[in-house]
Amino acid sequence: MNDDVIRVENLVKYFDGRCVLDGINFSVPKGCIYGLLGRNGAGKTTMIRILLGLEPATRGRTFLLGAESMNLPPKIRGKIGTVAEGHNLIQNYRVGRLIKLCKDLSLQWNDKFFSHLIETFHLPTDRRVRELSVGMRAQLNLALALATDPELLILDDPTLGLDTVARRQFIELAIEIIQKQGRTILFSSHILSDVERIADRVGILAAGKLVVDCPLEQLKQRVKKLRVIFDESAPANLYLTEIVNQQIDGREMVITVANWNEQKQALLETFKPSSCIDIPMSLEDIFIECTRPVGASFKGG
């Protein structure tokens, strides 16, 4: 039995003759927190809309909870919670009326947990949605998505527009939710430190391709940035594969290499550098390197 909650097969999407997603393949197993990253316009929201059946693919197929995205039955949709970019809620409704509408439309509703969230966020139920701050609308959106006890939670840049305090509160709650057994989360964000705090696995979109798809810790281990010093001028070519970035200044070379291994280490040592210093990289550093115009693709287990 396949335990993949999300599955994407050879996904291609064109807009006005431009290829936005080019042959994307990946899967997310049950209980995984998958961080989907990419620069603005990389195709993150488009992919999420295709996954949710809100946008047709040009080619390829996508599946959620075993059902094809374009034909999700109500029973499957009831197991999916979403928080969309921009938090587009019915602006003229009072919060209490919106809550009642969502509850009436839901196949299941956890009153106790929802009440806990409303109290945690101090959300006023007598005010209109348009009168809430951006942070409060984000919190309301998350609470509504979680009230149905979804098996799959899809968050599309949910902290966009939040101040530091509201964002931290949002992420801490997300971590609490993540700890619930069996929950699967797809989390797209432009704030990489947030993804780094909660993601098990990371995918990075660049130029229409999924250039990274591997566990977060494996990614940090396999992308190596080195400052290499030579006795004389640095060689123009180290003959290493998958060099993401390389800069030379006299005797000094700074290189970033994907899929670093013992063979690459041995090849570097044949050039007899006088020193080789490992430069620590955060997820943000790795993201910047991997989304340069020319970079290496690498996947993991």
Image: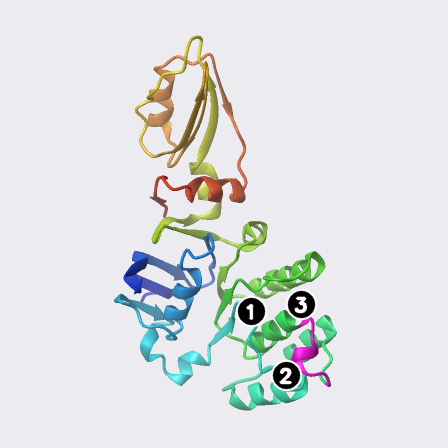
Q: Is residue 60 above or below residue 115?
A: above
Precedes in sequence: disc 1 or disc 2: 1
Instruction: From the top left corner, tell me how far across and down residue 150 is, in percent.
Output: 51, 74
Q: Which residue is mark 3?
A: 135
Distance from disc 2 to disc 3, alpha carbons, whole Å, reads 22 Å
- Name the one closer to the observer, 157 or 221: 157
What amino acid does circle 1 point to? Gly
Three-letter amino acid code at the position of disc 3: Gly
User: Residue 183, can we see it?
Assistant: no
x and y percentages locating residue 151 in the rendered image: 48, 72
Mark closest to the chain's N terminus, 2 or 3: 2
Q: Are marks 1 and 2 in contact (CB under 8 Å)?
A: no
Residue nearest the observer in this picture, 214 or 20: 20
Q: Look at 36% across and 83% down and name the residue there.
A: 73
| Tag 2: amino acid | Asp
Q: Which mark is residue 154?
A: none
- Marks 1 and 2 sit apart, C-alpha to C-alpha, by 25 Å
131 or 221, which lies in front?
131
Q: Is residue 50 above or below residue 255?
A: below
Location of mark 1 (residue): 86
Looking at the rendered structure, the secondary structure element under dot 2 is: helix
What secondary structure is marked by label 3?
helix
Q: Which residues are magenta?
A: 126-136
147 above or below 18? Answer: below
Residue at the limit of the structure toward the front, as seen here = 16
Q: Are marks 3 and 1 in contact (CB under 8 Å)?
A: no
For disc 2, the marked residue is: 111
Of callouts 3 and 1, the N-terminal one: 1
